[in-house]
Image: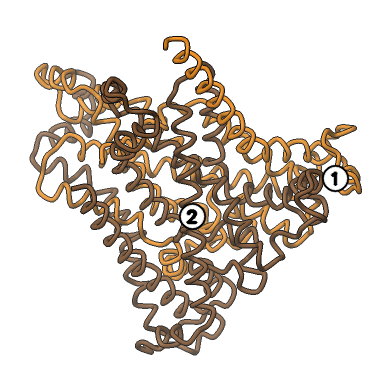
Chain colours: A brown, B orange
Amino acid sequence: MTSSASRYLPFRALGELSETRYWMYLLLLPSLVLILLVIAYPTLYGMAISFREMRLTRPGLDGWVGFKHYAAMWSDPVFWIALKNTVVWVTAAVVLELALGLLTATALNRDLPGTKIFAVLILLPYFLPNVVAGHMWALLLDPRLGVINDILVRVGILQTYKAWFADPNAALAATILVEAWHGFPFFALLLLAGLKSIPEDLYKAAAVDGAGVAAQLRLITLPMLKTVIAAAVILRVISLVNSPDLLLILTGGGPGDATQVLSLYAFQTAYKEFNFGYAAALSVVMFVILMVFAVAYIRISRITKE
Amino acid sequence: MIESKRHRRMIANIATYVVLVSLSVFCIGPMVWMFLTSLKYEADIVTQTMQYMPSRITFDNYVAIWTQSGFPLLIGNSLVVTLLTVTICVVTGTLAAYAFSRFAFRGRDRLMLGYLVVRMFPAVMVIIPLYVVMRGVGLVDSRFGLALAYTSFLLPLFVWMLKGFFDSAPRELENAARIDGSTRLGAMVRIVVPLARNGLVASSVFIAIAAWNEFLFALMLTTGQGSRTWPVGLQLMVGEFQLPWGVLAAGGILSIIPVIVLFAIVQRTMVQGLTAGAVKG
């Protein structure tokens, strides 16, 4: 027994406890209790709420209503618009981020002088808060004083300044651009790590066999990156479906319901209308859709691997 | 043959630099523009002809955001919430990460997968019931309550990241200490944790940044000045007072300075920790 640990009784008792076979469970206990308390319990409780009437503004309304909220959702046009927008928004953002991420990772992986500085600059947006990212882009795309409008007019692409977030046809695309800016470094990060794990010898062997750059990309890089791409895509889809932050800041779902997505609709139903029952039902449906997608996606990406 | 190879390599290098420079401009440009805006007079922001470089510089916007709004209070609240979140995660998460990394026991893999799956739960799905539960126990509008809510999605992340760092800390020293009569606890505290020091710092910084930036939980769970964090405060200021662009930009710059500084310091280790899990599969 080392002297410093045995000097204090509580430490010695803990030290002795650490020699028993229950030690690992004791180590896990605090975090497990915390997670059960702040996630598992609220989640189950939330599922229960989705079968109840719960409006904070009208405390008298309370009680079980069965599948009422789910039935209401079926005939709620906003729900279907939000579902469609979620699919478009997530798909477009992920495709754009994956493409930009692949380009970045390939460029960074060549390890030319100065790469480290470029890496820091390019990764930075991912760590910026949504609130700042949102307002920054609102300023850049502002209909009266946005610098991007100014540049586009000068170059001749636009005739006049455009109100990107107020135009129902452009709003969703504009928010996708902002999301891509915010999220693509995540793909760059993971794909770069994936590229670094591909043995150099593979490329040398391919070059000896006369494979060109395109063939190397198709036959070595993409197959070797498959797992990383699959993991990155699923993680990103989950976080995009779940987080309404950026849209809440940029458009609040508008104009009309042009940028309304499921997570935002659920949040606003709770935050603005205090209709917790319906909001809970919306988020349960969202969760189920996400789970089905995740399981199907993992199955499919496994099959193609073999 | 050699000549053309060198030629091709040169073209590839130039193309690489073009890509890297364009992407850097795309990433950093908006931030530079926000910084320039924060230094402009309002009259120079709202003009007929766009001013690319400010013709005159002012720090009024910074003075305005700091003195004329509750901004220092908001920053203070965010600081407290962030520190509480990191403390909770470090204390409970380090123990869990160590257990996952060093012990084989029944249900270990399932439990780890469980820690991963809870990250998939929609924030909205957790927020609504969490609000009801916290209102019941008086934790709405409390900085501790908010920090507790943050651990719901940050603790699993912290455990996974730190486990990776513990895994790569060599076991030999630990074994040697055990042979010398050190208890498991002693070996953990004196050998393993110091070995994984950089990883511990990087993981902590990562969750600190996430807690500092968080918006949605804070919007729902704080209602008063006493616990409101800066993202919520800034957002509400924009809505309520029609915050001038220059002042908003100054607020944005002030609030991302800590993020940029922390990121710059530990970025390499943090990136390593973030990517380890995904690459290993």
Look at mark 2 in the image and give the residue it sits on. Answer: B146
Q: In the figure, is residue A79 to the left or right of B183?
A: right
Q: Which one is in front, A106 or A196?
A: A106
Q: Residue furthest top?
A: B2
Q: In percent of the image, x 32 and y 35: which residue is there? A: B276
* Label 1 and label 2 in one chain: yes
Quadrant in which residue A216 is drawn? top left
Q: In the figure, is residue A201 to the left or right of A146?
A: left
Look at mark 1 in the image and give the residue it sits on. Answer: B45
Label for residue B230?
none
Q: In percent of the image, x 78 and y 40: which residue is there? A: B37
Locate residue A297, reporting x and y percent.
Answer: 30, 58
Quadrant in which residue A268 is drawn? bottom right
Q: In percent of the image, x 29 and y 48: which residue is there? A: A31
Dot 2, how many residues are within 10 Å of its Cα: few (below 14), some (14-19), or many (20+)? many
What amino acid is labelled 1 in the image? Ile
Quadrant in which residue B136 is drawn? bottom left
Instruction: Say which element carries label 2.
Output: helix
